[in-house]
């Protein structure tokens, strides 16, 4: 279904002016061609989404625009003037700002110091703090941000507010083009709406926004045009209103994904593999839950509802202090593993992997630590469809989707009876999402019990055989397979 986006009608003549034109961009690294003749253009006041699977060339193209890499061929024009960048500072001076998924802020400095880092206003040979803080306050006000001020330390701000600081920095540089790389990957649902409002404020100022995201719903909500890359080449550029989500997926992956989600279990669920009665701790109260063999149970709720805390309690990382649980309530993660429970954590980089070590070592982390499970790595990597399955490669060099597959291999090595997934497809492309979804259903069909937490309601609804919803650490209700988003949100916001 094609949808129009409210408030994004015909642009003024000023906004229709093209500010960026990239023509025939090519780039190779060590003889490997990663970009081939890519064209990209953006107009003032436009949100232009750049999409594609991991490895499609999105990041390389944006780093060329930002002056991090120099193209081997092709040209860049900004405001009709041909430019070449040998350094990111030169790109900034030409009006290009890039906001990376991992921020470049200094946490121990104030908001104002970060916004004007390296170009602090001076007076009589000293930094004019009053002028710097006043200018920062004006920037924050213009972006509609009143919840923090120029003197606040960055480390005390939420991820969403740190993102506002990055945007304020871009505006202070008089940026004509702002690149956002997966800007909502670490945001809660309510914070995503705030970011979208900020994006609209940028376009109202005539700024062109290049928006990179794997979340296709966001792409269709925000973008005026969409450019699709695949294997380093341009597939197409089209108005967002002329595409459906299914058509966009086909363009990205080169094949039809009839549904994002595999068919639900054909057989009724089997025996109860995990049950909790009256489970509680500092964050959870009166939890009643059953997980059965062959079933994927979705866990819904708003940010802060206790979803991740429940997964950690079941696993033993943040154990229950009251209630009954079968198998016996684990007091530590090791006891959870011994009881046949695994946990795919929300933050794979910080909690799930050793980024500087090889794929092989990461896949065997749990097996070696517990002295149990299989050690045939190649078979594990083949089963999780790692591409390419190089066990000697460092994990940090893999895409987000392949990193998540290594996490899955780590748990499959010890064959848990119950596997808890916390945001299993966050920050991965549509092709990797489909592979992870297929694998989850395959594991359930093989007799595993799965609990899946997801902030993406289509994923929660599409993957779950039933859904349990939390609010403020309590279960507010349970829904059968295939409920509406409104049904889930009603329970998530219930008083």
Image (tube, rainbow, N blue to C red):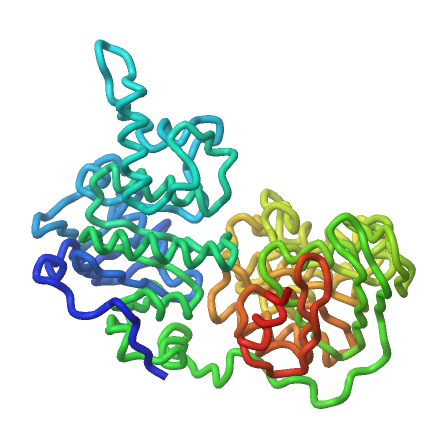
Residue drawn at x 80%, y 76% is 292
Q: Quadrant of the C terminus?
A: bottom right
Instruction: Using residue 318 as the reference point, say whether residue 235 is left or right of it.
Output: left
Residue drawn at x 51%, y 33% is 155
| Residue 140 vs residue 449, the one in the foreground | 140
| Residue 98 vs residue 139, the one in the foreground | 139
The answer to whether residue 37 is above or below residue 168 is: below
Q: Position of residue 2 (x, y in %)?
A: 33, 81
The answer to whether residue 374 is above or below residue 105 is: below
Q: Position of residue 370 (x, y in %)?
A: 84, 51
Residue drawn at x 62%, y 67% is 494
Identify the image quadrant of residue 469: bottom right
Instruction: Using residue 472 as the reference point, say whether residue 397 is left or right of it.
Output: left
Q: Residue furthest top?
A: 124
Residue drawn at x 58%, y 77% is 487
Instruction: Using residue 203 as the reference point, say whether residue 232 is left or right of it.
Output: right
Identify the image quadrant of residue 106: top left
The answer to whether residue 74 is above or below residue 435 is: above
Q: Position of residue 179 (x, y in %)?
A: 31, 51
The answer to whether residue 262 is above or below residue 92 is: below
Instruction: Using residue 81 as the reference point, say whether residue 252 is left or right of it.
Output: right
Q: Quadrant of the N terminus?
A: bottom left
Q: How many tags in the picture?
A: 0
Q: Position of residue 277 (x, y in %)?
A: 86, 65
Q: Residue furthest front?
A: 495
């Amino acid at each position: 279904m094609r949808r129009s986006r409210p408030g994004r009608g015909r642009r003024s003549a000023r906004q229709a002016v093209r500010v960026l034109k990239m023509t025939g961009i090519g780039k190779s690294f060590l003889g490997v061609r990663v970009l081939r003749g890519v064209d990209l253009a953006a107009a003032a006041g436009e949100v232009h989404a750049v999409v594609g699977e991991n490895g499609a060339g999105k990041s390389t193209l944006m780093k060329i625009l930002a002056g991090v890499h120099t193209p081997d061929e092709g040209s860049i024009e900004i405001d009709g003037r041909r430019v070449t960048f040998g350094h990111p500072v030169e790109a900034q001076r030409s009006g290009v700002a890039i906001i990376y998924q991992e921020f470049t802020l200094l946490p121990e400095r104030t908001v104002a110091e970060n916004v004007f880092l390296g170009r602090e206003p001076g007076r009589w040979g000293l930094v004019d703090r009053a002028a710097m803080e006043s200018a920062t306050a004006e920037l924050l006000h213009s972006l509609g941000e009143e919840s923090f001020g120029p003197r606040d330390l960055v480390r005390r701000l939420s991820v969403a507010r740190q993102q506002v600081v990055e945007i304020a920095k871009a505006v202070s540089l008089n940026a004509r083009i702002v690149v956002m790389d997966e800007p909502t990957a670490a945001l809660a649902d309510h914070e995503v709406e705030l970011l979208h409002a900020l994006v609209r404020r940028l376009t109202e100022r005539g700024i062109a926004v290049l928006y990179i995201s794997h979340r296709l719903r966001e792409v269709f909500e925000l973008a005026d045009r969409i450019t699709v890359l695949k294997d380093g080449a341009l597939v197409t550029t089209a108005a967002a209103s002329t595409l459906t989500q299914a058509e966009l997926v086909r363009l990205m992956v080169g094949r039809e994904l009839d549904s994002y989600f595999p068919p639900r279990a054909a057989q009724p669920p089997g025996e109860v593999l995990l049950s909790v009665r009256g489970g509680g701790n500092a964050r959870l109260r009166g939890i009643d839950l059953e997980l059965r063999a062959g079933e994927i149970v979705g866990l819904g709720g708003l940010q802060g509802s206790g979803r991740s805390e429940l997964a950690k309690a079941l696993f033993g990382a943040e154990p229950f202090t009251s209630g009954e649980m079968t198998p016996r309530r684990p007091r530590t993660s090791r006891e959870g593993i011994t009881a046949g429970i695994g946990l795919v954590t929300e933050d794979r980089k910080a909690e799930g992997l050793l980024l500087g070590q090889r794929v092989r070592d990461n896949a065997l982390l749990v097996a070696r630590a517990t002295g149990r499970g299989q050690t045939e790595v190649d078979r594990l990597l083949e089963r999780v469809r790692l591409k390419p399955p190089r066990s000697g490669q460092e994990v940090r060099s893999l895409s987000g989707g392949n990193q998540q597959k290594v996490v899955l291999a780590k748990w499959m090595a010890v064959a848990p009876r119950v596997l808890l997934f916390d945001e299993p497809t966050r920050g991965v492309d549509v092709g990797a999402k489909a592979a992870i979804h297929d694998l989850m259903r395959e594991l359930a069909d093989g007799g595993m019990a799965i609990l899946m937490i997801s902030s993406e309601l289509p994923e929660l609804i599409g993957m779950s055989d039933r859904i349990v919803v939390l609010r403020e650490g309590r279960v507010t209700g349970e829904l059968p397979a295939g409920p509406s988003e409104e049904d889930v949100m009603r329970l998530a916001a219930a008083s």
